[in-house]
Image (cartoon, rainbow, N blue to C red):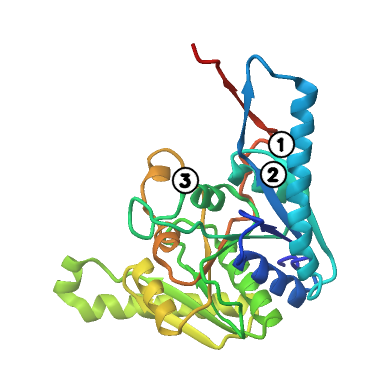
Amino acid sequence: MLQPIRRILAAVKDPGAPVLPAVVKATQLAHALGAELELFHAIDAATYVDMLGANVSRLKQLESEERSAYLQRLERIAARARLHTPVVTVAAEWDFPAYEAIVRRALESHTDLVVVECHPGRHHAQGLLRPADWELLRLCPVPVLLVKRVRPYHRPTIVAAVDPGQACGKPAALDEQILLLAAQLSNALHGKLHAAHAYQPAGVAACLMNRSAIVKPNAASAQLGLESLVARAGVALTGCHLLGGVAHDALEQLAQRLPADILVAGSMSRSGLQKALVGDTAEWLLRHLPCDLLIVKPAQFANRVPLGPVGPRHVTVEPLG
C-alpha cells in the first residue's frame, strides 16, 4: 500500500527568478493533497578566500549573512505560496553539489515527493538534461517530479508507464507503486489517469517467418498482464493503452497524442558503463519527453549519497607576484 504524500520538497534553483514553475506546481500539489511544503535552496557557490586576509570568524559571518539573504528571498516566495496552502517552510544550506544536497535534505526532512525545475539552456546534445538534473533523478530514493512545462496543472492528463512483463528487469512491485502514485496525483488534481504498457514484438527474422503466429500471442499476453496489474492496483482509469514497438518511442508518441501533462515512470540506478550510456526507457524519456516527468524508484532502492551537509566550498586566492 502506497503511503499518502504528506510532505513535499520544492528545490528552488534561483530564488530571485521571476517565474518559478516548480514552486507553482509544488504549491498546487500541496494544496490538493493537504501536504506540507518546504522550499529549499542549496547554496553551492564557492567562497573565495584571500590567503593574506583570511579570518575564520569573518568568513563565518559572511557565510551566515549570505544564508540569511537566501532565507529572506525564500520567505517572500513562501508568503505567496501560503495564500494557497497553509504550511510552507523554508530552508537554505551551504552544501554541494546541489543534487546531493537536495537528496540529503529530502531524507532529513522525511520528504515524500521532490519537485524540481529542469535546467534551461542549450546542451551538448539536443534535449539532453544538465548533469545536475540527471544525477538527482538517478540518485534520489524519493520520487522526483521534474518540471519541464511552465503552465500550471488544470485537470491534468497523467500517464502511468508500466511494464507488467518486467522486460527491463524492474521489480514487479514497482509497477504497482507507479500506478498508485499516479492515481493519487490524478485524484487530487481532478485529472485523467491513463496506463500504458509498451511491449516489443518478436524479432524481425522470426516475424518474417510467421508474423501473425508470433505477434498476436505477444499482444494477448501483454494485454492480459496490463489488465491484471490494473486490477491488482485497484485504480480507475480513463484510458488503457497497449503500445507495440520500442518503449521510449511509443510512450513519447502517446504523450504527444493525448497530450499528457505528467508521465510517471520507474527507474533503477545504473553504474559503470550503464551509467554513462543511454540504455533504458527512463533515460530516453528524460531526454526527449515534452511533458513533466515523475520518476519512481523501487522500495528497496539504496541511498548512496552521504548524509550530513558538506558545508561551504572555500577556494584560496593566491596573491599575485
Residue found at the far bottom of this picture: 238
Residue type for callout 3: Arg
Residue found at the far front of this picture: 321
Q: How many marks?
A: 3
SS category of the residue bearing label 3: loop
SS category of the residue bearing label 2: helix
> Alpha-carbon distance for marks 1 and 3?
24 Å
- Residue behind mark 2: 104
- Residue behind mark 1: 309
Q: Earlier in the sequence, mark 1 or mark 3?
A: 3
- Callout 3 crowding tier (Cα within 10 Å): few <14, some 14–19, many ≥20: some
Residue at 65% in and 71% down: 25
- Callout 1 crowding tier (Cα within 10 Å): few <14, some 14–19, many ≥20: some
Left or right of 212 in this view: 242? right
Q: Position of residue 136 (x, y in %)?
A: 56, 50
SS category of the residue bearing label 1: loop
Q: Nearer the viewer, residue 49 or 152?
A: 49
Q: Position of residue 307 (x, y in %)?
A: 70, 37
Q: Nearer the viewer, residue 282 or 93?
A: 93
- Residue behind mark 3: 270
* Image position of 276 with respect to 253: above or below: above
> Alpha-carbon distance for marks 2 and 3?
20 Å
* Image position of 163 with respect to 191: above or below: above
Q: Earlier in the sequence, mark 2 or mark 3?
A: 2
**Snapshot quadrant of residue 101:** top right
Residue type for callout 1: Pro
Residue type for callout 2: Arg
Q: Position of residue 58 (x, y in %)?
A: 77, 26
